[in-house]
Image (cartoon, helix red, strand yellow):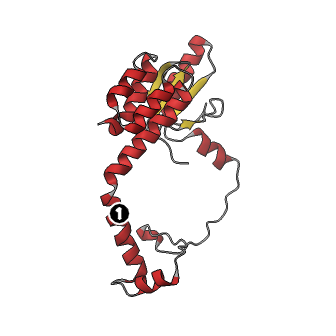
């Protein structure tokens, strides 16, 4: 499991911690001691996905190891790694691609071979769609967060429509009456999509 670089922790409608795993873990534990609260929701600060963190299992862990990955690695025996295809030292990973015969014929006639041509085509497409991908990722991040935190708040559906229509004024209007921390986080996730 890849660790989120920034984690958000909410208790009810309030953002109680924001930062790295270790920072958030410590702040949340302090919050629980002071407020006797156990209903905490965690979110990945980069993609809006909800994260499950077992606070009991996380008690002795350092700030740079996620609870889920530690629990998973601690319960399994060491299995020897299978030798993979490709050039692992260069970061090349061999995987299967299914194409029609005419596609293979065309690729076989390309300079550098099929793999080199596929890499060039993918790089061209990534450059051409980078802006659209950034907007879509921002919309999806905001939508995931809003669904979890604001799904039952008035204006949620209208805010989602405005988000995907890229209507900043409409989005701001629909989220204006939301609790401050939820509104600010939703707007933060949606920022790239509403420029």
Q: Nearer the viewer, residue 30 or 143?
A: 143
Of all residues, the one furthest to the left in this rendering is 195
**In the shown orientation, is residue 145 left or right of residue 187?**
right
Which residue position holds label 1? 125
Of all residues, the one furthest to the top in this rendering is 35
Rendered image quadrant of residue 192: top left
Q: Is residue 109 above or below residue 140?
A: below
Q: Secondary structure at mark 1?
A: helix
Q: Label 1 neighbourhood size at 10 Å, few (<14), some (14-19), many (20+)?
A: few
Rendered image quadrant of residue 84: bottom right
Residue 54 location in percent, x, y?
A: 64, 33
**In the shown orientation, is residue 33 left or right of residue 170?**
right
Q: Nearer the viewer, residue 55 or 49?
A: 49
Q: Residue at x 61, y 66 (%)?
A: 81
Residue 136 location in percent, x, y?
A: 41, 45
Q: Nearer the viewer, residue 113 or 51?
A: 113
**In the shown orientation, is residue 35 left or right of residue 170?**
right
Residue 123 location in percent, x, y?
A: 34, 65
């Amino acid at each position: 499991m890849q660790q989120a670089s920034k984690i958000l922790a909410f208790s009810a409608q309030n953002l109680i911690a924001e930062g790295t795993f270790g920072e958030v873990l410590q702040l949340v534990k302090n919050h629980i001691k002071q407020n006797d609260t156990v209903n905490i929701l965690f979110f990945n600060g980069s993609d809006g996905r909800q994260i499950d963190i077992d606070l009991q299992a996380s008690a002795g862990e350092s700030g740079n190891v996620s609870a889920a990955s530690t629990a998973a690695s601690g319960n399994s025996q060491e299995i020897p790694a299978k030798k993979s295809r490709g050039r692992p030292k260069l970061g090349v990973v061999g995987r299967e691609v299914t194409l029609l015969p005419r596609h293979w014929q065309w690729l076989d006639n390309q300079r550098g071979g099929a793999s080199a041509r596929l890499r060039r085509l993918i790089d061209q497409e990534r450059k051409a769609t980078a802006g659209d991908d950034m907007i879509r990722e921002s919309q999806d991040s905001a939508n995931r967060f809003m669904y979890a935190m604001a799904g039952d708040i008035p204006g949620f559906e209208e805010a989602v429509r405005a988000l995907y229509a890229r209507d900043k004024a409409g989005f701001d209007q629909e989220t204006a009456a939301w609790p401050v921390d939820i509104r600010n986080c939703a707007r933060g996730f949606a920022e790239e999509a509403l420029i």
